[in-house]
Image: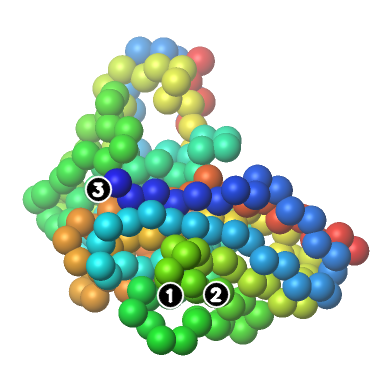
Amino acid sequence: NAGVTQTPKFQVLKTGQSMTLQCAQDMNHNSMYWYRQDPGMGLRLIYYSASEGTTDKGEVPNGYNVSRLNKREFSLRLESAAPSQTSVYFCASSFDGLGNQPQHFGDGTRLSIL
Amino acid sequence: AQKITQTQPGMFVQEKEAVTLDCTYDTSDPSYGLFWYKQPSSGEMIFLIYQGSYDQQNATEGRYSLNFQKARKSANLVISASQLGDSAMYFCAMRPTSGTYKYIFGTGTRLKVLA
């Protein structure tokens, strides 16, 4: 019953450092998503992937890259971290057969950029 | 462009009373789904309830019901018999049934249940 697993749960970086947030789902879902959550702004879509091998930009893609490694895994990379990227990051997945399926979320990664 | 609006940043409700959390949306898609999620202070996102744009009846899930008024483009969440454990952030979300797989989220409403 793992669902969506995100690693790490917490991370502190210095400005300019790089890191990759990992996400894996075991529900055989087609679509995967990366969001950031900031106070008062809800969840904003960074990137999503409708299927293995495809990725598309969301609302706030600048400063991020993604890789859909296979059907299970979808990683988010910060090449040169900036303080504005301090946020809580959520990975989600969904099965999009009929469009009526909710997203399943990981527990989030709390990222601080100093 | 699609948009979800939640105009209530914070709400209070007395324990055991009902509360309505507002959600209005804007879309040009003919077919879409509406979702509500709960985010307790522990941070996880919990799916609560779904309403399809062509569903004839309002969705219900236990103490949660959705007051769907398509002409007004509103999909308000009603929580009956509030419990202390209902204190959380609540997010309304929408996505088209076909085409793009993007979900659009509102900014959320923080609900506090008072003993």
Q: Are marks 2 and 3 on the same chain?
A: no
Q: CA distance from mark 1 to mark 2?
A: 7 Å
Q: Please report, as a chain letter, where disc 1 is located.
A: B
- Residue reaching furthest left? A53
Q: Secondary structure at mark 3?
A: strand
Of the 4 image quadrants, the one containing the N terminus of chain A is bottom left
Q: What x and y, as percent, mark residue B72?
A: 47, 65
Which residue is more in the foreground, A112 or B15? B15
Residue for badge 3: A48
Can I make out residue B83 in this image?
yes
Dot 2 surroundings within 10 Å: few (below 14), some, or many (20 or more)?
many
Q: Secondary structure at mark 1?
A: strand
Q: Please report, as a chain letter, where disc 2 is located.
A: B
- Residue reaching furthest front? B71
Question: Which residue is rendered at x = 55% and y = 83% of the image?
Answer: B60
What amino acid does circle 1 point to?
Answer: Gln
Q: Earlier in the sequence, mark 1 or mark 2?
A: 1
Q: What x and y, as percent, mark residue B104?
A: 37, 52
Tell me the quarter of the picture where residue A99 sits.
bottom left
Residue for badge 1: B51
Which residue is more in the foreground, B9 or A89? B9
Tell me if label 1 and label 2 are in contact, CB under 8 Å: yes
